[in-house]
Image (cartoon, rainbow, N blue to C red):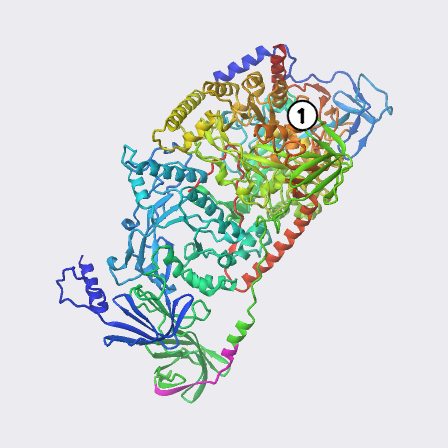
Amino acid sequence: MKKLLLSLTVICGILNSYSQDYFPKNDGVNTTNSNYTVFKNATIHTTPDTEIKNGTLVIQKGKIVQVGNTITPPANSVIIDLKGKHIYASFIDLFTNFGIEKPKQKRGSPFRGNPQYEASREGYYWNDHIRPETNALTSFKYDAKKATEYVKEGFGVLNTHMPDGIVRGTGLLVALNNEGTEGDRLLSDRSSQFLSFSKSNKSKQIYPTSLMGAMALLRQMYYDADWYAGGNATNKDLSLEALNRNKNLPQIFEAGSRINGFRADKVGDQFNTQYILVGGGDEYARIDKVKATNAKYIIPLDFPEAYDVSDPFMANLVSLGDMRHWNQAPTNPSVLSKNGITFSLTTHKLKKIADLKDRIIKAIDYGLDKKTAIAALTTVPAQILGKSNLLGSIKKGSYANFLITEGELFSKDNIIYENWVQGRKNIVNDMNVIDINGNYSLTVAGKIYDMSISGKPTKPKAEIKLGETKLGAKINYKNDWVTITFTDTDTTKTQYTRIVSSITDSPDLWSGKAILPNGAQTSFSVKKKLDESSEKKNKKSTDTKENPEVLPIAYPNIAYGNSQLPKSESLLFKNATVWTNETDGILTETDVLVKNGKITAIGKNLNDSNAKIIDASGKHLTSGIVDEHSHIAAAAINEAGHNSSAEVTIEDVVSPDDIDIYRNLAGGVTSIQILHGSANPIGGRSAIIKLKWGESANNLIYPNSPKFIKFALGENVKQSNWQSFSRFPQSRMGVEQLYVDYFSRAKEYHKRKTSGKPYRKDTEMETLAEIINGQRYISCHSYVQSEINMLMKVAEKFNFKINTFTHILEGYKLADKMVAHGVGGSTFSDWWAYKYEVNDAIPYNAAIMHKQGVVTAINSDDGEMSRRLNQEAAKSVKYGGVSEEDALKFVTLNPAKLLHIDDRVGSIKIGKDADLVLWTDHPLSIYAKAEKTIIEGTIYFDLEKDKAMRKSIAAERNKLSTMMLKAKNSGLKTQPAKKKEKQQFECETLETIN
Amino acid sequence: MKKIVFIIALCVISFGKITAQQTPAKAQSEAITITGATAHIGNGEVIENSIILFEKGKITAIGANGSVPAKGTVIDASGKHVYPGFIAPNSTLGLVEIGAVRATDDDSEIGNYNPHIRSIIAYNAESKIVESMRPNGVLMAQITPRGGRISGTSSIVQLDAWNWEDATIKVNDGIHINWPSSFTRGRWWLGEDPGYKSNEKYAEQITELVDFIHQSKASIKSNTAENLPHLAMKGVFDGAKTLFVHVNTEKEILDVLRFSKENNIKKIVLVGAYEAYKVANQLKQNNIPVLATRTHSTPQQEDEDYDLPYKNAKLLMDAGVLVALQNSGQMERANARNLPFQAGTVAAHGLDKEKALQLITGNSAKILGIDSSTGTLEVGKDATLFISIGDALDMRTNQLEKAFIQGRDISLESHQTKLWKRYSGKYNSK
């Protein structure tokens, strides 16, 4: 308390700009300072776009009272002459955790031991990671040291928050006024609300384990908040109350990457909330989609350092995509700007606040307009916060937060002299210091030395030579006094000459006292040499500055991406062996015509003058392979935090830039169902996509996609194979009851919903009700016959049908029951023995099911095997004697039927989508390669083109490596070569979000 | 345990009538002649319309049909194909029955330097997985322990035996080193970046390994039985055992070459060696063979050719390196029966079919040091061979009619064929 009083005194005594009338005062008389500070003759950049030459700025009590060029200063003014200098508004950073410590994460795999399923808190939302009630102020401790770092870089105001949790509560807006009180500095204690996809470190509550779980949780939270706001809840929920209270604040979402930005935006749009997105710096690669979010962005400037590729073994680890990102990332701000996207810049992710200037200059070198850069640190953040009247520009009524600079902001040689915050001066570089840099001749004791002084004007370095001999020299320059100590030419002796002088307004000539090595005192004189070379040098360096070379982006922006999105063509295949999958069977020497993405004609001697002719003699044409069970192209697979996760959908986490898409195309795959994993009895909803390499996630997903959900049975859902014993069910017996429970509840839910009574919208129940009502299909991971039988019985009890059993390794044991129920089977060709429940898995399974009349498919569940599904189908010929024609249907028409997309794909039939594969050989043969893979008439894979791409990838890698070596040799920092982890997902993969 | 006993009992009762799946075949009692088949020798050669004669377990004649008189039982295999039995090197067959059931896992031991650990005694000749190899033509395997810096000692078996002793083709054939990785992966659960980065301890780990080699040499000279791991290394220095070095990247491979020379290792084989194709010339010059990374795998780097794993063995073979296929990795045991199709995949991606066959026959035998008795269809070698209706490297035509191990007419039935017949019967009787 004493300390506080003391600091109050200091402010009143020195600054005297805050009259706090109602504060009692016991340590002296009340003093009020109503004087003005007037800055004259400056170029005042009132906004990034407007300036006043020879302007005058008048401030009083921490605020701007006048700005213009015809101002007569009031009598009680302190006048500062800023001739030749510039004034800009101080910067604002919207995304920091200044003064707030992020809680430490509890380490260890969340799946080990007995995970925590319940919330740790009472009276709050059921999920610990939803913390809208957090008020960052309660954890805030003004950090004067850090503030100084920000001030030096030009910041006046920071928006700060508690970086913890999915909903993180409100942040605060604080002025970097080191001498002020919290009462002075705190501009808003509820400036904005913060969100992210990362869980809170304060709780080990396991849900959500996945990105899609986080998205589902946000949606449910908004529904619940509505319900709560309607007064329908019987319990007190402080989180939802806070959420409703925070509704009208700016909502800042830390997305962290372009694609997560799209995901956040999708959630926000659903609830009429436009998030302000903290980007990832990779927005440039899909700028049209970024623009389509309509979001304002907060953009970090952590351009990657060049990878150190000097060790070729290590260099190998760095992918072309990462190399390109190094090359292209500095264009991000400029690309955003050129596309009319409103963004502010942040120091977030910078290693040092002091890196800001260099990064912005780099962005400017890569095409960013200086004014846009300034706006992104001043007017834009002010406007995002709704505080344009107080912050971000130099105008009457605003806080007196401004910079005094030597020249234009973000020009290379510019110096920030002072950063005034709330009317308080912070000296960054002494603007009154006399620059003594230059070359001099120093005369002392009859000797004439050459002396050159260089470096920062406030902290110069000296070099002294006698003839060609360089002497040791130290210079100290402070408060207009300079002292220099230098050694003798005779290096065997330790002897120094010292000189001291005061610097006056004419620093070209100085003189003063010298103390010689023998202690004798004498005088010296220093005279500046006429020097033109330094100016020349400056000129030269600007003249020779090259425009940085930026390589073009690709779709997707990694190896094998196309420089332009491929287009649909009219194609005419001549003389192919055509596997129609229809009653026509296999047609030899047949032509197939493709137009407008559809199959338009099948027959002999077809002609079309507009179509590209593809000679298919000796080759086989089939419809594209359909994989009923895939986990590629997804950022998450399992939401393992609950035993039911019907609320999540893989559609939220489709990853269109996954190299496995291209590799699957090379194996003839055109459509896949990305299934949720098997971590829980009721999994998540599927994404059914086409492998349109280069397109956005939304464009991959089938339009009017049939609705699917993954269920799972057996060892995985009862968590047999990892150490986890606390979640129901732990046995197959429990699995049945879980289903009965959920379906009963869903039925009740639906009843209430349709009754007209108010109901709490529950995504999970909505999904389950869809199943009961026949609007959503189940694909159920299954192994042993007992549980398969059970699930059919449960479904029958609730009057619906299971659509597909996937894996279904014991399907052969109850194929008759499956036929009776009307369920299909999508199985592996020959996997078994990896766990107890696949002990009786046999490669004859598909053949037996098929023979009994089950619609049978063969699937992958594996990013490698999916590239050879035609071969896996061929195994059904080997094991159980299925006809070749039927075997091919196991990976084309039958999975299309199971997915309810057989009206569009799965066979070569007039009117269907032209999703085709041209094979070099019999498609069931090990020797067959996909030569062309076509989706809707667009060639997405072509063996010849692939060959050309390999060459261009090698060439581009080489080019970028050379550029990185050049960067390294020019002294720029590098980072060690490394490879980003790409996880290969399968059913059992338990990924996690932090 | 009770449950398992019960299931086994049930199986015995139900299938009493089906003939002896698990029962190993009796020794060859009379001569067998196969005529008319296309004989794929396993060394790159083919004899169309051949005659193959074997007696007392050994091939006694092979040539053009009619070149020698038929003897004993004559099998007309006109239009069909005969192959030497396929060999699965670096396999854990018979060491693990069900991966997820710990009680059935015997493929690795604790400790880091385990050359004395011998796989052969844990080899379960009656494994259900082992018998499922045979219908696809995989008739021999190198049983290899896993884990640690030195995993242990492998042995080579044939896949139709009463017990491990009967199964043995070559006991203690080699010692397996897992070479330090020059890269490490971040541990995400400790909050590390999950990507790959340089392994800071790489050199240190190699030094430790070299120290172990030096210590072993010293212990062997004193010839006292004080240190089992050291003494177990003896064969590596006198040439009785092959040193199998499981290694991945180019740099590591070059380090292995240096290690091998400096430590005077007599016989060395690289296992996996994903980037071996980049240093194929050095491997050729130093006569170092490779058991290639699983053909059916995805490229390890995003930028690599989609078919790099498919053609990897071809690249090595083209460069003159002695190379064979192995199948370690996920679900390696059950999938070992797909070894022929992995060879077929290499053929699909550019290798001559007969050369592709060498990858799982003649070359494998050479690399494992069992080529004097097996690996090719040549006089004097074991009659370990099979008849397939069609091309055995293509699943479309790989249909075995008969298979022989050391002349014994082995069963092509398995747990899986039994279930197939049993449940086909269920529906047929309805």
Residue A794 in the image, given as x and y percentages of width and height: 46, 20
Magenta region includes residue A557: no
* Residue drawn 35% across the image and 82% down it: A503
Q: Residue furthest right?
A: B66
B303, above or below A865, in the image: below
- Identify the amino acid type marked 1: Asp
Depth order, front residue of B284/B420: B420
Residue A731 in the image, given as x and y percentages of width and height: 43, 22
Depth order, front residue of B9/A552: A552
Question: Which image quarter: residue A922?
Answer: top right
Label 1, on which residue? A886
- Using the rendered image of the protein, determine whether residue A505 is visible from the camera's viewpoint: yes
Q: Is residue A985 left or right of residue B296?
A: left
A560, above or below A536, in the image: above
Magenta residues, start to end: A520-536
Q: Determine whether the residue tagged by mark 1 lies in a helix, strand or loop.
A: helix
Q: Which chain is indicated by disc 1?
A: A
A374, above or below B198, in the image: below
Question: Which image quarter: residue B387?
Answer: top right
Quadrant that contains the N terminus of chain A: bottom left
Depth order, front residue of A329/A817: A817
Residue B345 in the image, given as x and y percentages of width and height: 69, 36
* Residue drawn 20% across the image and 62% down it: A8
Q: Residue furthest front?
A: A756
* Residue drawn 76% across the image and 26% down it: B82
Quadrant that contains the C terminus of chain A: top left
A16, above or below A913, in the image: below
Depth order, front residue of B64/B267: B64
Magenta region includes residue A528: yes
Q: Is residue A77 left or right of residue A46?
A: left
